[in-house]
Image (cartoon, rainbow, N blue to C red):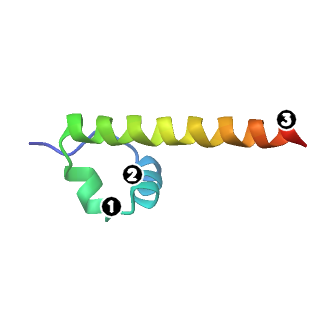
Amino acid sequence: MKPLQITAETAQMLAKKLNVPIEHIMHMPRHILLEKIATLSEDDAQDQAEAKDDDAEK
């Protein structure tokens, strides 16, 4: 399996958000990384929706 074709900046950002070492990101199977990115995206969308709701209540 070859390393993922992502930039160093992207790998650093994903490692920070997923709380895993950058080496794990670079050698993670593509389908698993895509699942984790989808989960992060859902969490971010949910956080933004909650923030909108909080602003609307004020």
Mark 2 surroundings: few (<14), some (14-19) or many (≥20) residues within 10 A: some
User: Tag on residue 56?
Assistant: 3
Quadrant for the N terminus in the image: top left
Give me the C-alpha separation between circle 1 and circle 3.
39 Å
User: Tag on residue 48?
Assistant: none
- Count of numbered marks: 3
Q: In the rendering, at what x and y percent does residue 38 appear?
A: 39, 34
Which comes sooner in the sequence, label 2 or label 1? 2
User: Tag on residue 22?
Assistant: 1
Vertical side of 4 occupied by 17: above or below: below
Give me the C-alpha separation between circle 2 and circle 3.
35 Å
Mark 1 or 3, closer to the camera? 3
Mark 3 surroundings: few (<14), some (14-19) or many (≥20) residues within 10 A: few
Answer left or right for 15 relative to 28: right
Vertical side of 24 occupied by 58: above or below: above
Q: Secondary structure at mark 2?
A: helix
Res 2 quadrant in image = top left
Is there CB contact under 8 Å for labels 2 and 1? yes
Amino acid type of the residue tagged 1 in the rendering: Ile
Quadrant for the C terminus in the image: top right
Q: In the rendering, at what x and y percent does residue 7 appear?
A: 40, 45
Which comes sooner in the sequence, label 1 or label 3? 1
Q: Secondary structure at mark 3?
A: helix
* Residue depicted at x 39% and y 51%: 11
Q: In the rendering, at what x and y percent does residue 14 appear?
A: 42, 51
Res 50 quadrant in image = top right
Amino acid type of the residue tagged 2 in the rendering: Ala
**Residue denoted by label 2:** 11
Q: In the rendering, at what x and y percent does residue 23 appear?
A: 26, 61
Vertical side of 24 occupied by 50: above or below: above
* Residue depicted at x 85% and y 35%: 56
